[in-house]
Image (spheres, rainbow, N blue to C red):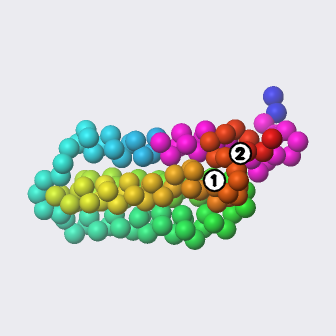
Amino acid sequence: MSTRPVSGHADLLPPPQVWWAVWAALMGSVIMLRVVIGPGSGTASAPALIALGPLVVAAVARFLVLPRFKTPAKAFPFFVAGLAAAEGAGIIGLFLGGRNADTFIGLSLVMMGLYAPVLVLRRLLGAEANPFRQGHGVE
């Protein structure tokens, strides 16, 4: 069984469903951690500011790195890495943020929202493409 794409459509992989599944899983994990662990208590510790580092990494990946790619296949690893950085910021903030944990979770969710595949794929594929469909709008 060959894993090569048919007729040279390597730039169409991975399909939009994979982008959406990764995005939803990472976004859902932050929400579920917040729900399961509950609100923060106590005062924020100074190491909680470490959570801002992954947020900056996620912002750089989203706004400076991802727009440079012309095909989704090349952009996908940076999409996942940026989402993971944003998720990491939320998790760090949740455990170290004390009463400010919800602030870190909120910042993390906003950054992850900016990675929504509808925003990223439209930029990569052009405004006329449909990022919800298999084949990226190519018939």
Q: Residue furthest left?
A: 42
Q: Are marks 1 and 2 in contact (CB under 8 Å)?
A: yes
Residue 74: give x, y in percent of width and height: 69, 56
Q: Residue furthest right?
A: 7
Closer to us: 124 or 101: 124
Residue beneath disc 2? 136
Residue 15: give x, y in percent of width and height: 67, 41
Closer to us: 73 or 133: 133
Lateral position of residue 128 relative to residue 9, left or right: left
Lateral position of residue 93 relative to residue 73, left or right: left
Residue 99, placed above or below residue 136: below
Q: Quadrant of the N terminus?
A: top right
Residue 91: give x, y in percent of width and height: 33, 52
Q: State the predominant SS element of the stretch in magenta.
A: helix
Residue 118: give x, y in percent of width and height: 57, 51
Residue 10, magenta (yes or no)? yes
Please tell me in which quadrant of the rendered image residue 7 appears.
top right
Q: Residues within 10 Å of mark 2 (few under 14, many from 20)?
A: many
Look at the numbered disc 2 and give the secondary structure of its residue.
loop
Residue beneath disc 1? 121
- Residue bounds of the magenta highlight: 3-24
Q: How many marks?
A: 2
Q: Amino acid at mark 2?
A: His
Closer to us: 21 or 80: 21
Residue 118, magenta (yes or no)? no
Who's the residue at 54% across and 64% down the image?
A: 62
Lateral position of residue 105 relative to residue 68, left or right: left
Can the viewer see residue 13 in this picture? no
Q: Amino acid at mark 1?
A: Leu
Please tell me in which quadrant of the rendered image residue 52 appears.
bottom left
